[in-house]
Image (cartoon, rainbow, N blue to C red):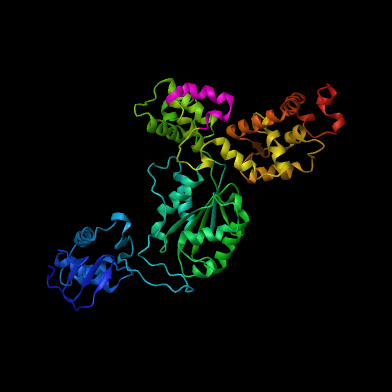
């Protein structure tokens, strides 16, 4: 037990409000002695001797029970006693840290020279990942591939349209990989950055480092950096990735973006919407569909008595199809079920995306409505890219390059430009590409098309290009290739 003789002259080891007098085996808090058992003090003695470093469980057991064979549970009991005595974790104070592979560590502050190479002190948390309260639905296959891939790659990028759940996936990967990175996993949100020059500074601030020479400071580290929302600062992210690859090979980057960074060695993981079920499938298959499961879970979080039955399942499947299985869209739709019911939500989707404008008040601005997500994507397009994107709204289903050439080209948007413009829209996840045996097809997601259709109608161009689309289908494959302006079908029948 603690000796309650006050050792006025004995050197002490201090941490926070606590002092440990090793010779007297006494621990005090603000000068007042604490009652601790002998084994707990033995454990503390070993941790103090290795303060700032992890001590394996086997080493601790060997020191504290040198002549006995004991189970690991015995060690955990005395670690728990120390933590209770230190009020460990209360008000953010951490004194005894643990690592699944490395053991336990007494967190002791230490001085790091201003210009020294970074060495992460174990008293800091090994991550800044937010706690996730809801399960990740329907992503097991993607997560499995990323968990196998990310630790072996310098750069992995998860791509997909806005609202598809990229942030959810990269955060879950980081949580599951914590034990694989000795210096932790760190999440860097780039969405709020307007100046690309701030990217390096944001990463440094996240890691608690001085600005400048980031690669050199991270050179000895083995960590995962998660860069979320790279699409609007893509060039700065490329510079960061190249700098870290050259100077800090132990740092792995996991990025989320609408488009890849387009760097050598980058592994790209396209993220589709959640799998949807056909309303014609049996009820048990609809119930097992990931998109439907997520929608039901989100509605149930708002309406505790919500229990779909009968025709509800068919309507839920239709809603998921209309929303392309996009998790954000499903969450926004779920917010309206208490007022409209599932049938009312499906009916309102006929009138565009205005229904999907009220979500969680705590969400970041770009995720509070689906239109805001798409606005952010379209704002980064060039004028020709934007024009092409809006005109593609006339296509009600998959289409070929030849059909697009026939329908949307004009004097201002030439035949020669269109292949590159379509490729660019596909690269930023606004246009889906479906490789087929007979040749590639393009398509817009239902949600993306609804957005583009609304914009095209407001511009006054919808009637012209919709007529071209209808006539292109009526005239058949022989007239689907681009023709000179003087021979376009709509001109022959006096539509312009």
Query: Residue 331, image x and y in percent?
Result: 47, 34
Residue found 45% across the figure and 65% down from its top = 222
| Residue 373 appears left or right of 37 | right
Query: Residue 354, image x and y in percent?
Result: 56, 29
Residue found 70% across the figure and 44% down from its top = 382
Q: Is residue 278 visible?
A: no
Query: Residue 260, image x and y in percent?
Result: 60, 51
Q: Nearer the viewer, residue 400 or 349?
A: 349
Image quadrant assignment for residue 23: bottom left
Q: Nearer the viewer, residue 386 or 271?
A: 386
Q: Is residue 69 magenta?
A: no
Q: Is residue 133 visible?
A: yes
Q: Is residue 355 magenta?
A: yes
- In the picture, the quarter occupied by the C terminus is top right
Q: Nearer the viewer, residue 438 or 231?
A: 231
- The stretch in magenta equals 338-357
Query: Residue 32, image x and y in percent?
Result: 17, 65
Q: Magenta: predominant secondary structure element?
A: helix
**Image height check: is 474 above or below 413?**
above
């Amino acid at each position: 037990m603690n000796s309650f003789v006050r050792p006025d002259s004995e050197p002490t080891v201090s941490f926070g409000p606590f002092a440990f007098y090793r010779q007297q085996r006494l621990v005090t808090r603000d000068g007042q002695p604490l009652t601790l058992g002998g084994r707990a003090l033995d454990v503390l003695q070993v941790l103090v001797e290795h303060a700032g470093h992890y001590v394996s469980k086997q080493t601790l057991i060997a020191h504290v029970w040198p002549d006995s064979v004991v189970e690991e549970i015995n060690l955990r009991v005395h670690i728990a006693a120390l933590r209770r005595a230190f009020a460990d974790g209360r008000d953010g104070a951490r004194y005894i840290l643990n690592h699944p592979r490395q053991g336990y560590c007494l967190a002791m502050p230490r001085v790091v020279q201003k210009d020294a190479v970074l060495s992460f002190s174990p008293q800091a948390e090994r991550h800044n990942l937010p706690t996730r309260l809801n399960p990740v639905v329907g992503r097991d296959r993607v997560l499995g591939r990323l968990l196998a891939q990310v630790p072996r790659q310098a750069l992995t990028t998860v791509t997909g349209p806005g609202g598809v759940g990229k942030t959810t996936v990269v955060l879950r990967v980081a949580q599951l990989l914590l034990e694989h990175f000795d210096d932790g996993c760190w999440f860097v949100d780039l969405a709020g950055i307007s100046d690309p020059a701030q990217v390096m500074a944001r990463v440094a601030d996240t890691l608690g480092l001085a600005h400048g020479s980031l690669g050199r400071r991270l050179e000895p580290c083995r960590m995962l950096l998660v860069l979320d929302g790279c699409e609007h600062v893509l060039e700065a992210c490329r510079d960061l990735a190249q700098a870290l690859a050259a100077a800090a090979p132990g740092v792995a980057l996991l990025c989320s973006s609408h488009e890849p960074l387009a760097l050598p060695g980058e592994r790209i993981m396209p993220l589709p919407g959640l799998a949807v079920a056909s309303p014609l499938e049996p009820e048990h298959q609809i119930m097992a569909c990931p998109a439907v499961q997520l929608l039901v879970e989100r509605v149930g979080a708002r309406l505790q008595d919500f229990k779909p039955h009968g025709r509800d399942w068919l309507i839920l499947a239709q809603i998921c199809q209309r929303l392309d299985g996009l998790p954000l869209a499903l969450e926004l739709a779920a917010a309206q079920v208490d007022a409209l019911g599932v049938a009312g939500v499906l009916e309102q989707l006929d009138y565009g995306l205005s229904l999907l404008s009220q979500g969680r008040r705590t969400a970041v601005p770009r995720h509070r409505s689906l239109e805001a997500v798409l606005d952010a994507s379209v704002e980064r397009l060039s004028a020709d890219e934007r024009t092409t994107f809006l005109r593609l709204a006339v296509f009600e289903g998959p289409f070929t390059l030849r059909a697009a050439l026939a329908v949307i080209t004009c004097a201002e948007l030439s035949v020669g430009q269109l292949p590159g413009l379509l490729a660019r829209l596909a690269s930023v996840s606004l246009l889906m590409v479906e490789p087929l045996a007979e040749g590639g097809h393009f398509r817009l997601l239902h949600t993306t098309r609804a957005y583009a259709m609304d914009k095209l109608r407001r511009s006054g161009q919808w009637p012209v290009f919709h007529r071209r689309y209808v006539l292109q289908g009526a005239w058949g494959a022989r007239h689907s290739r681009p023709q000179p302006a003087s021979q376009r079908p709509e001109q022959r029948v006096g539509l312009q």
